[in-house]
Image (tube, grey):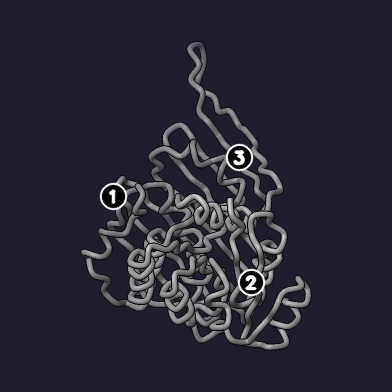
Amino acid sequence: METVKVGVIGVGHLGQHHARIYSELPQTHLVGVVDSDQERAAEIGQRFGVPHDAHWQKLLGQVDAVSVAVPTSKHREVVEACLSVGVHVLVEKPLASLLEEGRDMVQLANHKGVILQVGHVERFNPVRDLVQDIIRNPGFIECHRLAPFQLRGTDVDVVLDLMIHDLDLILSFGLGQVNKVEAVGVTVLSQQVDFANARVEFSEGCIVNFTASRVSTGRLRKMRLFQENLYLSVDYQSRQGIIHRRQELTSAEPSVIEESIQAGEEDSLERELEAFVQSIQTGKSRGVSGEEGLAALELAHSIIHSIRGLPFPAAELSNIAMPFL
């Protein structure tokens, strides 16, 4: 297959790793990096031996694809400009700040016939591969995602910054449509909501409780899942899990079998970028599509509406589900 010419727009905390991985993948050629901070652009460009610039428009016409890792408020401007000239795009989560922006981006990608994927990197966490197939009609799921405070990411609230990782993961389990959302949130150290808790009811009967905080003393990325004859605990940070299964015995009381799981050390971001490149090369989506990113964004905004005491259109709420399920 032909080498894919790629560029990275925004080489801050996350974008620098996109550049590193593209510079190492055999199926990609890193054409250049861009950052509005000229010194940062120069630093990363020199590190990987590629041209650098402060203006992302300079990349257009030179690349087949880009990773976009600029602040969320800038996603629409950059992504739509790239899509408009036929450049495939992987944009870091969330897809956009506003629902209208996300919908327009997905519509444009479909109109232009180019790939739009969203960087929900937790989908590529190797531990997810070990548990995905055992999840069958869960009744209750609890997700916790906690992190210490830092200024990066505070252009949006914690629902779009951290919780959206778990919103995407849960939607990928195929629990049906969203029936009801109740949420609370607190502004603590930034001008946005820094702590949020949401209770979401799905049409297949599952209730999911989401908690996200960016004002914690440590980091936590865990999920607990309960279904008939099975309890599952997953730590996305350590890539470990424990599966408890009920075993029926003919001559005694039912017993519980405990199984510990440990995923490998594969780089989740590298797996994500490889999936993006393979999608370009094969024409078959292997990453998180724009439509899937939009579903997570819609659920996030229904939670934000609930926190603010605002109604979310019932018709839009019932349409929130993974499009491929």
- The label shown at residue 122 is none
Position above or below: 260 against 318: above
Q: CA distance from mark 2 to mark 3?
A: 33 Å
* Mark 3 vs 1, N-terminal side: 1
Depth check, front residue: 88 or 248: 88
Q: Nearer the viewer, residue 8 or 135?
A: 8
Q: Nearer the viewer, mark 2 or mark 3?
A: 2
Q: As drawn, is 204 to the left or to the right of 66?
A: left
Amino acid on which disc 2 is placed: Gly
**Mark 2: secondary structure:** helix
Q: Residue at x 62, y 70 (%)?
A: 216
Q: CA distance from mark 1 to mark 2?
A: 37 Å
Residue at the image position 23 percent from the left and 69 percent from the top: 313
Evaluate if marks 2 and 3 touch, with contact meaning CB atoms under 8 Å apart.
no
Q: Which mark is residue 203?
A: 1
- The residue carrying mark 2 is 15
Front residue of this view, candidates 92 and 256: 92
Q: For the image shown, how many numbered marks are present on the structure?
A: 3
As drawn, the residue found furthest toward the top would be 251
* Residue ID for mark 3: 242
Disc 3 from disc 1: Cα separation: 27 Å
Q: Position of residue 295 (x, y in %)?
A: 37, 61
